[in-house]
Amino acid sequence: MVRHGFSLGAFGNVKAAWHVMRANQVWAPYPDNDPEAARQHMTRFYRMADRAGRLSIDPRIAAQLEVAWWHTHRAHSHAQATDEDLLAALVRLYCYVYQADPVDVRRAAEHRVRAMALSDAWVAAGCSLDDPTLGEERLALVASFTALREASDRGALANHLRL
């Protein structure tokens, strides 16, 4: 994902992916996770993408929004947040990071919420590698990233036309 989404070069892709992985690792333990460490790793990731000219954002804000949707996803999995809460958290992240209009990123967020539901179901069912849910999840993720790319391209074109 890092390589295709941000193209930071061989070493940069590995380093950025490592920060994303570490952020997920420190976030994962429940209930004893470390949201601050997760935000720090995601700040480093977003700083790399920003410095490479792939984004034009404040890396700290992007990291806060990233970890906020992780928090909402966790709350959702414990029936403390709705699908709409999760969708809204993703839309906020996507709007900020990709400087896109909420209407443009909503479809990407909807597909991502579907992928999360499929992933959660797969985990609950025991994580079998031959479970067809994995294929459905992959399709939902591809649809999400495709819609996000389209929204990002529309935003970039609109910004270019305003110049």
Image (spheres, rainbow, N blue to C red):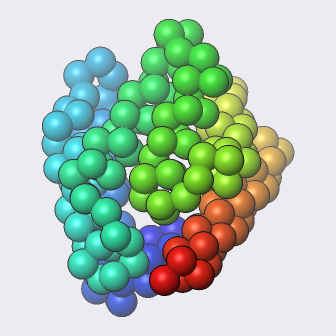
> Percent position (x, y) of residue 135?
79, 52
- Front in this rendered view, residue 105 or 40: 105
33 to 11, vertically: above or below: above
Compared across the picture, whether 91 is left or right of 144 comes to left
The residue that appears at 29% across and 18% down in the rendered structure is: 31
Displayed quadrant of residue 146: bottom right
* Residue 17 to residue 113: above or below: below
* Residue 95 in the image, given as x and y percentages of width and height: 50, 51
Outermost residue to the front: 162
Q: Residue at position x 68%, y 47% from top? A: 103
- Observer able to see residue 54: yes
Asked whether the viewer can see residue 122, the reply is no
| Residue drawn at (50%, 28%) of the image | 73
Q: Residue 130, image x and y in percent? A: 77, 48
Quadrant position of residue 155: bottom right
Q: Residue at x 20, y 62 (%)?
A: 44
Q: Is residue 75 above or below residue 27?
A: above
The count of marks equals 0
Find residue 30 and report its horizontal and vertical position in percent. 33, 22
